[in-house]
């Protein structure tokens, strides 16, 4: 009789252990409901190479994407001999002035360009793009007409001119902060230049 009771106790213990083992996974899920959810969603990350929008800034905001016009995708050299990237102008209002040292119209409007660039410093970036002559002549022109207040490129091969389809001077390219590009292929009076630059600054 005693032996039968012991056998029965062993059977009940074995059955309880089996039940506990079978419910282990369900109990873990009940104790930590987030565990199953994490497992189910951990494989939803973007595939390699895909884009998910602009990265958040340190403050948690999203920075808007900067539009780079095709014309600004160039590198050139300044009159001082340093490398210049056209893409550095993207996302901000800018004026490119195309000129040549020997050009009478460029000489006539140089003081106006210098004055307008100075008046809008910090709001609109001016960039001179010189071609059709030697670098020494370009430097002489900048010094003579007080144009040292902004950067000038030595576009001796007219590569930058070509990107904006400029074939004669003077000419301008007005670049909006939104990536818009307007090329004007003629001389501008002081009032015309001031009005155009004002629109860029206020946009």
Image (cartoon, rainbow, N blue to C red):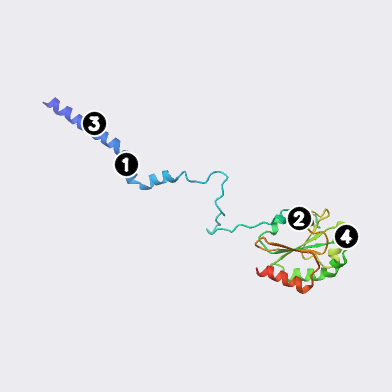
Going from N to C along the chain, the mark reached first, 1 or 3, is 3
Disc 4 and disc 3 in contact, CB within 8 angstroms: no
Going from N to C along the chain, the mark reached first, 1 or 2, is 1
For label 3, the residue is 14
Of 39 and 99, the residue lying toward us: 99
| Residue 15: quadrant of the picture | top left
Q: How far across and down, in percent of the image, does residue 203 sit?
A: 65, 68
Going from N to C along the chain, the mark reached first, 4 or 1, is 1
Of 172 and 84, the residue lying toward us: 172
Question: How far separated are the C-alphas under marks 1 and 2?
Answer: 67 Å
Query: Which residue: 31% across, 42% down?
Result: 27
Relative to residue 76, is residue 102 depicted above or below? below
Going from N to C along the chain, the mark reached first, 4 or 3, is 3
For label 1, the residue is 26
For label 2, the residue is 163
Relative to residue 37, is residue 120 depicted above or below? below
Q: How far across and down, in percent of the image, does residue 1 sit?
A: 11, 26
Disc 1 and disc 2 in contact, CB within 8 angstroms: no
Question: How far separated are the C-alphas under marks 4 and 3?
Answer: 101 Å
Going from N to C along the chain, the mark reached first, 2 or 4, is 4
Going from N to C along the chain, the mark reached first, 2 or 3, is 3
- Please rate how many residues cluster around mark 2, counting C-alpha atoms within 10 Å: few if below 14, some from 14 to 19, many from 20: few
- Please rate how many residues cluster around mark 4, counting C-alpha atoms within 10 Å: few if below 14, some from 14 to 19, many from 20: some
């Amino acid at each position: 009789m005693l032996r039968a009771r012991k056998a029965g106790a062993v059977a009940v213990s074995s059955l309880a252990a089996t039940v506990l083992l079978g419910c282990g996974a369900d109990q873990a899920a009940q104790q930590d409901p987030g565990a199953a959810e994490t497992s189910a969603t951990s494989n939803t990350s973007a595939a390699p190479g895909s884009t998910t929008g602009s990265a958040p800034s340190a403050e948690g905001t999203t920075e808007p994407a900067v539009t780079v016009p095709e014309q600004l995708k160039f590198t050139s050299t300044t009159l001082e001999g340093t490398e210049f990237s056209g893409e550095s102008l993207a996302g901000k209002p800018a004026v490119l002035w195309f000129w040549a040292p020997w050009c009478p119209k460029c000489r006539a409007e140089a003081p106006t360009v210098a004055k307008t660039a100075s008046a809008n410093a910090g709001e609109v970036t001016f960039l001179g793009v010189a071609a059709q002559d030697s670098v020494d002549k370009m430097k002489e022109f900048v010094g003579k007409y007080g144009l040292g207040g902004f950067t000038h490129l030595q576009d001796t091969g007219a590569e930058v001119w070509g990107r904006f389809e400029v074939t004669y001077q003077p000419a301008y390219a007005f670049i909006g902060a939104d990536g818009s590009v307007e090329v004007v292929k003629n001389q501008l009076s002081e009032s015309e230049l001031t009005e155009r630059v004002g629109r860029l600054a206020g946009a």
